Amino acid sequence: MPRRKRVSARKIASEPPQNTTLTAFFQLCQTDPFAKTLLYVDVPIYYTWDKTRKIFQRRKQGMPEEGHPEIMKTNAIGRVYTVHPNNAECFYLRMLLHEIRGPTNFTDLRTIDGYICHTYREACQSLGLLENDNHWELTLQEATLTASAEQIRVIRHNSNNKPIKPKTAMGLFQTEYE
């Protein structure tokens, strides 16, 4: 095509993937001992995201962290995107990011008490996150704040991961839309 740059599939395949905030968090945890103490959602409190270099950098302004005077913190809010339960592995990965401090790779998120789980769901079960309907209650609670009644019904009915006590899980939020 005229004025189009030729791109080789081999060249694209050989280039390393760009950092995401999650992979940059893994790298940060490998090099910064303080970061190893944090949950993914807490990183923006202590670090800023450099969009150009795609890395996290320690904040230079803010209040000193208690016990770590060289580390500044702010009241920044971290956000992890909502994931539909039908996207099961991403859904369980998101749950683990709210539970596991300082992972250095995806395998760390699946490693529970020295055992590497085969899936993120298995890791969630090992941590006791799925032994009851708490994750469904949290998902529905979040949905009542941001989703329509129809979207909440879709979340509930399309999921392959049925709550243990579906009437209890749905009953908690039924009055929100009556």
Image: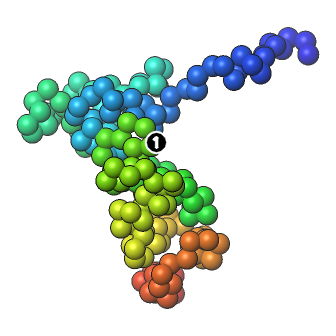
Question: Does residue 31 appear left or right of residue 142 in this picture?
Answer: left
Q: Residue at x 80, y 13 (%)?
A: 5
Amino acid at dot 1: Phe
In the image, 76 versus 85, the foreground residue is 85
Return the x and y of residue 120 as percentages of the image width and height: 48, 55
Quarter containing the N terminus? top right
Q: Which residue is mark 1?
A: 106
Q: Look at the picture and state if 162 lies above or below 109.
A: below
Question: Does residue 36 appear left or right of residue 106 in this picture?
Answer: left
Return the x and y of residue 12 as percentages of the image width and height: 70, 21
Q: Is residue 18 visible?
A: yes
Q: Residue at x 46, y 42 (%)?
A: 106
Q: Secondary structure at mark 1?
A: helix
Residue count near mark 1 (Cα–Cα under 10 Å), binned few <14, some 14–19, many ≥20: few
Q: Look at the picture and state if 90 lies above or below 6.
A: below
Q: Is residue 76 visible?
A: no
Name the image colouring: rainbow
In the image, 148 versus 53, the foreground residue is 53
Return the x and y of residue 70 as percentages of the image width and height: 14, 26
- Residue 156, quarter of the rendered image: bottom right
Q: Residue at x 51, y 53 (%)?
A: 118
Return the x and y of residue 112 as percentages of the image width and height: 35, 53
In the image, 35 versus 137, the foreground residue is 35
Question: Does residue 169 appear left or right of residue 158 in this picture?
Answer: left
